[in-house]
Amino acid sequence: MSSPFLRCSIITPTTDLTLRKTSLRGKGLVRQSGKLILIPKTPGKASLPFPIKDEKTGWTLNSVRCGAIGQKAGMTMEWDNFGVLRPLTLIRVENCHVTKVFNKEQHGVDAVQLGATEAKIKHLSPAQIGQFAASGIAPKRELQQFKITPDAVMPVGTEITVQHFVVGQKVSVTGMSKGKGFAGPMKRWGFSGGAASHGNTLNHRTHGSTGARQEPGKVWKGKKMAGHMGHERVQAINLKVFEIYPQLNTMAVIGCVPGPNGAYVRVIDSLSNVFSEPPPFPTHHEKEGDKAQWIQYQFKNPWYKLPDLQEHFWKAAATDQPEKLFNGQWTTEHATLMSDEVKKSIRDKISERERNAVKAKLEARLRGETTKKKKK
């Protein structure tokens, strides 16, 4: 049976009653595919689950916004609206402004240079002092360049705040990982090491052989061996923005971010991101009368993917071995949806009689007994 979903780049209006595979990557409408989108079987114009353009701001699906320079403020955790504990990384976007604009005719690329955190003049080079003096903004300690499309150009001095991003969207965060110094092959590459005894002498944590004999007669470049570990550019992709705190100019993303606390990170829109609403374009601008509010992402109902297994979840929460009730169909996704808080709330709603009945049925199944009644 064929899947009702097709891997599409974009959806166009359809007039037939079949599922069509549409690819408009050549026209530049989508930067990266990989989303499973259902094209309705009904005739007429297809209903899109995401916007394509915004007439007010000029944003289109092909527009590339600039990112932001932030500082990693640490990690924390918080319960979402369905009782699932989410690990969060706090990123503070502070004093981030556009310091320079590049165009394709003069510089060969459409990009903007952002600067973050005010710096002292004695720490700047003469070239940087001249650049900041000409732009008329305060000197910045961290400078990074972001490629954009021509419609996302912003004038020098534009401030980038944390409200440049939207709750629920996916971002990619790049930073320098923590340096571990000189590390052996077991820590650096996860090698299992040698034997602990039985003739092994001083070779317990070595990497072992590094190649053959006369052929090729050398050690190939890139061989996994001991060496410097960490302090390299690492990118964490597709991190969902969980919360935004405009008063603190801080946002929380689900997952971990490379680098120590206080390190500068580069935050951009993920290539596979799909906005439910048009984002601030080219960036967020404060308006008179706007009140900054804390915004938290509201997850969808965890049961919407598994409606037929909802009853099994209720019964499984009353037992010590819930996977036995699924006849081998228990997956990691099921275990993730059933957090400890969800299990506790479900147990409180199940009566003692039903719990004992389920437990007795499980014990009988484990003993191999059948529940069929004997014929008289």
Image (tube, grey):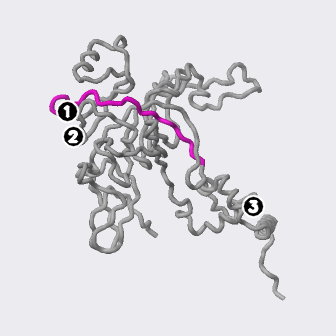
Asked whether, in this view, residue 311 is left or right of residue 215, the answer is right
Q: Which mark is residue 103?
A: 1
Secondary structure under badge 2?
helix
Asked whether, in this view, residue 107 is left or right of residue 123, the answer is left
At a point 35% along the width and 54% down the height, the residue shown is 277
Please give the residue where the numbered disc 2 appears in the rendered image: 150
Quarter of the image where one finds residue 368: bottom right
Work out whether mark 1 precedes mark 3 in sequence or the reverse, and give the earlier one.
1
Q: Position of residue 146 (x, y in %)?
A: 31, 33
Secondary structure under badge 3?
loop
Q: Is residue 315 above or below residue 146?
A: below
**Spatial separation of the CA atoms under disc 1 and disc 3:** 64 Å
Q: Position of residue 30 (x, y in %)?
A: 30, 51
186 or 220, nearer to the observer: 186
Work out whether mark 2 precedes mark 3 in sequence or the reverse, and give the earlier one.
2
Query: Which range of residues does the magenta coloring cover?
Result: 85-108
The three-letter code of the residue at mark 3 reads Thr
Q: Position of residue 274 (x, y in %)?
A: 37, 52
Q: Is residue 233 above or below residue 337?
A: above
Q: Indicate yes or no whether the magenta region holds residue 88.
A: yes
